[in-house]
Amino acid sequence: MTHTQFLASLVCPKTGQPLQVAEDGQSLTAPDGTVYPVLDSNIIDMVHPRELFEDDAREQHLYDQAYQRYDRGVSWVFETLNHSDEAATRQFMIGLMNLQPGQTVLEVGAGTGKDSALIIEQISPGGTAVLSDLSPNMLRLATQKLKAEEVNVHFFLGNGSYLPFADGTFDSVFHFGGINTFSERKKAFAELTRVVKVGGKVVIGDESMAPWLRNEPTYQTLWKANPLFRAEVPIADLPANVENFKLHYIFGNCFYVMEYTVAAKAPEIDIDLPIPGKDFVDNWRLRAEKA
């Protein structure tokens, strides 16, 4: 997918309607007149809403300020968590998607591109990596770090709760390290799932201390120092059309990673199917009515 083709594939993050690409390729306009500009390094500003919710705006500001020291700080965090092997763990997470050369992958919250580099490696040759973040400075740093000769790489500023793509655009979607702070987390899960093809994989992770460790003294110190470790795994936010769900704890059991396959629809439960072998009518519906 060339840059021109990528621009043409984008839709309005609010309504899903097609966008008009300017003749010079430097902006896209929605039917309601909203303009999404192309910034330096061919980063497209697709953020919606244009004025972010307070929590999202705060996170954007924090990451914009910390982008130069971010990688060092994150590596320190993982080293404190059972002296975890950061590189091997990142490989494990990316491996959950079972990527193949030539596939098209979206990473939401790409940051400085640490996981992006592994994605690019696994879909090469011929693949397309679409990388987004809410922080302009983080994404600019990623454009400088990532070099890909046999993979098309595209960047856009975006809010994971409003993705500018048609249904089923990607083979896989990956997000790690941010969804705890999303203002509209349930909507984000719906969007991250919507843009994946039926049968494709979604892999998402963030802080959440394993329940069996929460009374351990060092772990209590950890979550006092950073309340995000108290977050619960947001299983209840998943959409209904999910199958083959698996949950992993990583980095000293202080982070989770969930993986699932996108199904065409939610599972069907036949509550009226009679139980065989009985001399009277019995099924789930009747049992519920009697309960």
Image (tube, rainbow, N blue to C red):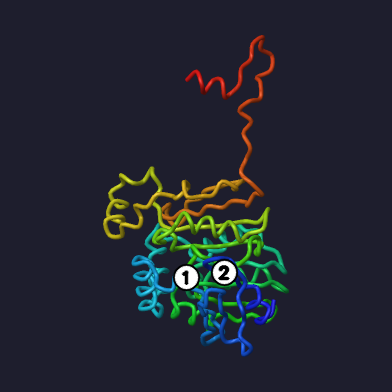
Location of residue 196 by image quarter: bottom right
Is residue 17 shown above or below 247? below
Of residues 257 and 272, which is closer to you in this image? Answer: 272
Residue underneath mark 1: 48
Q: Secondary structure at mark 2?
A: loop
- Give the number of the disc on residue 164: 2
Q: Amino acid at mark 1?
A: His
- Using the image, determine if residue 279 lies above or below residue 246: above
Are the residues at dot 1 and dot 2 in contact (C-beta closer than 8 Å)? yes
**Among numbered discs 1 and 2, the one appearing first in the sequence:** 1
Q: Identify which residue is drawn at 66% across, 72% down.
A: 128
Marks 1 and 2 sit apart, C-alpha to C-alpha, by 9 Å
The structure residue drawn at horizontal position 39% and vertical position 61%, both measured from the top left corner, is: 181
Residue type at numbered disc 2: Pro
Judge left or right: residue 49 versus residue 7. left
Q: Is residue 122 left or right of residue 251?
A: right
Q: Nearer the viewer, residue 136 or 52?
A: 52
Q: Image quadrant for the N terminus?
A: bottom right
What percent of the width, then of the height, locates residue 230?
34, 52
